[in-house]
Amino acid sequence: MMSKLTGAERQSALLICIAVLLAGVAMAALGHGDLMGAQGWVVIAYCALMLWFIMPTIGDPEPTEDRSASYYDDPTKAGIIIGMIWAVIGMGMGVWVAAMLAWPELRFDGAWSSFGRLRPVHTSGVIFGFGGNILIATSYHVMQRTCRARMPGQLSPWFVLMGYNLFCVVAASGYVMGVTQSKEYAEPEWYADIWLVVVWVTYFVLYLRTLARRNEPHIYVANWYYMAFILVVAMLHIINNLAVPASWTGAKSYSAFSGVQDAMTQWWYGHNAVAFFLTAGFLGMLYYFLPKRAERPIYSYRLSILSFWGITFFYMWAGSHHLHYTALPQWVQTLGMTFSVMLLVPSWASAGNALMTLNGAWHKVRDDATLRFMMVAAVFYGLSTFEGSFMAIRPVNGLSHYTDWTIGHVHAGAMGWVALISFGSIYALAPLLWRKTGMYSAKAVEWHFWLALAGTIIYVFAMWNSGIIQGLMWRTYNETGTLEYSFLDSLIAMHPYYIARTFGGLLFLIGACIGLWNVVMTVRRAPRQQPERDYPTSSEASEPALPAAE
Amino acid sequence: MSVKERDPLTGHQTTGHEWDGITELNTPVPRAVWFFIIVTHIWALIAWILLPTWPLLTTYTKGLLGVDQQEQVEEAVVAANAQRADWATQIDHLPPQEVLANGDLSRRVAETGHQLFGDNCAGCHGTNAQGGPGFPSLTDAAWLWGGDFGNIMETLRVGINSDHPETRFGQMMAFGREGILSRDEVRVVADYVQSLSGEDISATRREHGAQIFADNCASCHGDSGIGDASLGAPNLTDDFWIYGGSDKALFTTIFGGRQGWMPAWENRLGLTERKILALYLMQLGQQRDAQVAVK
Amino acid sequence: MLKDLLKPFARFFNFQARTHYKAERHSIALALGIIGAASIGGIVEIAPLFTIDSTVEAAPDMRVYTPLEQAGRDIYIREGCYACHSQMIRTLRDEVERYGPYSLAAESQYDHPMLWGSKRTGPDLARLGGKYSDDWQVRHLIDPRDLVPESVMPSYAFLQDAPLETDSLPGRLAALRAVGVPYTDDQIANASHDAIGQAMPDSTAAGGVTERYGEATNLRLFDGSNARVTEMDALVAYLQILGQLTQLPYEIEPKAEE
Ligand code: HEM
Ligand code: HEM
Ligand SMILES: [Ca+2]
Ligand SMILES: [Ca+2]
Ligand SMILES: [Cu+2]
């Protein structure tokens, strides 16, 4: 893979690696005795691994290929494999923490293996490790194809991908050691947060520069979504992570905000991490891979506009639905509730747009598991957004908040939508990237689909049940007019559902393992095939007149 | 594909673009979408008018309903208390035996006591009030401070060795650690304590133990070891143990001393709630007596 | 009728679609549009929380965490207790009846970050302080199932063996002051000392604690041992202060008991 880089690019990569390595050495030395020191060693190890890839190629001859004649897919390939590895790690952690709630002794008496420390390894592992890598990888693919242009450089895509993974590794290893800011989905400490800003700005510049090179007058919808993902995540990340470190040589920092302002900022972030990390980017994926696989035109361009701007605008108001009935002033809660409900229409519009696109291709959905992944993902997207808007209504949230109902909702979205659309996209993408006839095993894709679907359904139904039972038990009054159950009664009632959830999660995990295996085997064993046309071409589009409404 | 095409299936035109083989139809936004946009927006508008919603610089719009979540919950609690008042006042004012004899009130105590006990006491005394290592069972006949209604109420109010100014204070000295008794003497008196609840020991050991007991322990636990509820000193002749009656447990108790800690509930639970709990414990006691009687 | 009603919307949207059609050719216009659309919600909802006075109630008796309690809070965060425990009693009747007076914004005004939580695998802890003995807390953290057989809480036995790191406490308090917690120079300078003093009431270090943090401060052998100050000491000291930083919530509790 390195051989495609020019000598200058390889040298720059080397320099960047050494610079980061030195930062790691500084962390290890200055942070000695603090967890920061241990994190320094993680950085050093990561950079050493990178150097191990780069060093042997430093003296290689300059590449001879004509860059303008092809897309640059090496980082995409790497991103997909890394993403699938994270999927197995993150979901494996999910199964483990799920099992710990059913059988709490299921750990090796270490400090590192308690539920509280491993849970964020699961959430970050799946959201950032799996989701983030697949988002970055597919965004490289989609922006090049829909711009008919190769990315501007070869170094910055690698920097973004590997720099991002450094963030993920530092984050996950940190949680296990006990490094966390406790802000959900923003747990990494200040130095990791700063590093992510550097990576993210590079990512945005890369995106803009690719768009600037495009051979197509219009920017395709998928790119709007990827762009919203990049931009808004940057805004959210920077503001929610504002903090003052207790020491420049220590890991600990304190959030700039406190109490109610901190709560609002956190859930403005948290909700929109859902919206722009777990939704916008994946909608970009849906908008490219679904019509491509179905070979059908997008159902409605106008609906795309409506849902894109609806999502971008309304989502940002909805965060306060995580704080109903709390010490957050009620006026903010009303805003959160009403905007969440208004948000439903654009959300369903995008799910509907995807499903209507399948009109004329339903026989393919039946026969092709890859397309079925995407179709079911769109259905779960519609389902979880409907559920979300419902749960955002204050009295409903009064019941669901703090319970497993939220967890069920999360996983309808996260497994049913995020993971399924990712798997579908990967299966559509891998053969093309590696120039293969198809996935190594179509049967394995089929198996993965059913395992994932069964796993999701079992998980979500278990959590709906346990969540609603829990919520009701907490507020059930007996005839006397006093509370019927103690908290412990509700805890005991959860046990069977926690076992069922673990089982569902296990099915889902097995599916993901099969997926990883299938991708690796596709790379290694599937027969080769050159695609008909997969290189930058100049657009034949002349600017048509403004489209009139029909 | 610069020319707009018509999709044969739907009959709609494309926008005239093609991205890597993907085209878009220019289908108008379906009517249903507009309809739901209008419905949700009208709903939101109504909510904005009725409820506190829009921030102004230093205040916010209060809404026509003038609701406030804190007032609402306070009203709900007051209303709930008013609704419970008919039976709650009876529990407050009737003597405990009458409450327990009254079927209706007794049922209410049982129903309410379950949750109150589960959320506040079960952590120490166990879900079924049978105690655990270091925490006395509340269902047996053995009481440190007396098991009648008044004593239980007082224990609940001030706690034991708690930070309440009037707390009940009970301490068992660390006879071994403080050097009052040698290790051997501790073992002997432990054996003697076991013999009080019926275990066989040699006569010489009993004699020796009795002597140590009379010198050191009887001041609290009484000459015959039946305890003293005014000091919280438990009866050592029955077979109920807080910390266990094995050799090892007794050695630990006598060597290192004991000072159990029970929180004061005066500031945490209301008077009625405490009464319900005390009555609830008495109910558990009655159930136990009934079971014993059956046997 | 519906059609007529929709007409102005449709016309407006048609206009918007045309504008959009032009704008989507310019990546910068698109980026600015996204930033604009996405900024409004946050500004309207977050900024006024700093300017509307009634957002955070005035609680004159509100006190800051002592260094030991703050160290315990940092351990609470490190261990991820917030993943299972909320510290926010909502304004709902059942929560008030189960856990105590509803939480006020004032109570977490020195909490950087707040730990309101989003999941109750275990019970709410907002009113935990004083509910159990130190000894209970220690035993429960060492082995929750020893005391509550049904519990699914992890055991944290290692806290009892981990000496508390106190050298960094002045830096921590200084950072907290930088974000708005009113620690004095004196409190910051003596933070390490005070942490030890609070957990060793018989030591000479203890005197300064009451002087700097008030007579009501808990000075105890939280972990039951005089040998050294452990992470268990700190965590239990923190747990015992939950809900006790101000008495305001108890004062405004509706007094319609009897
Ligand atoms: C193998 C499948 C999975 C299993 C067994 C699993 C299990 C779990 C468990 C046990 C929790 C903690 C729930 C609690 O605290 O009560 C959790 C939380 C979470 N998981 Fe998963 N999970 C799986 C897949 C995923 C995937 C694919 C994603 C995202 C792409 C995801 C995202 C999350 C998130 C965001 C949370 C936090 C929810 C909250 O705080 O409300 N999970 N998961
Ligand atoms: C219209 C769209 C949506 C709305 C209005 C919505 C609303 C909500 C609500 C009301 C909650 C519960 C908050 C609480 O009680 O604490 C929630 C939690 C959550 N939702 Fe959604 N949701 C939507 C879509 C999604 C989607 C598509 C995902 C995809 C993965 C998702 C992921 C999550 C997560 C991870 C949480 C848990 C946050 C936490 O407490 O840690 N949501 N959402
Ligand atoms: Ca962070
Ligand atoms: Ca959560
Ligand atoms: Cu949300």
Image (cartoon, rainbow, N blue to C red):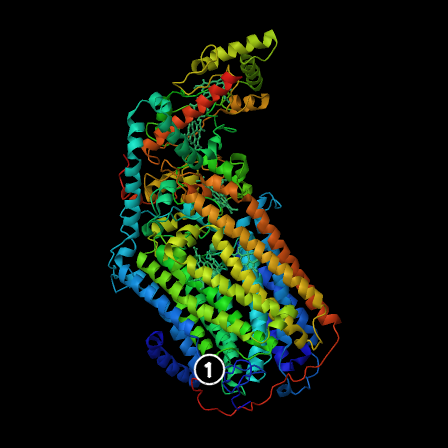
B71 horizontally vs C97: left or right:
left
B187 horizontally vs B87: left or right:
right
Q: Which residue is under mark 1? A: C27
- Note whether residue A389 is visible: yes
Choose between C189 and A56: the one closer to the eye.
Answer: A56
Residue A332 is situated, as x and y percent measured from the top left of the image, at 33, 60
Residue B283 is situated, as x and y percent measured from the top left of the image, at 42, 25
Q: In the rendered view of the protein, which quadrant contains the C terminus of chain C? A: top left
Residue A231 is situated, as x and y percent measured from the top left of the image, at 46, 73
Q: In the rendered image of this protein, does residue A183 appear above or below residue B103?
A: below
- Note whether residue A23 is visible: no
Look at the numbered disc 1 and say if its residue's Cβ is closer than 8 Å to ligand 2: no
Question: Is the residue marked by circle 1 packed among few (<14), some (14-19), or many (20+) residues within 10 Å?
Answer: many
Q: Mark 1 falls within which chain?
A: C
Disc 1 secondary structure class: helix
Residue A481 is situated, as x and y percent measured from the top left of the image, at 36, 38
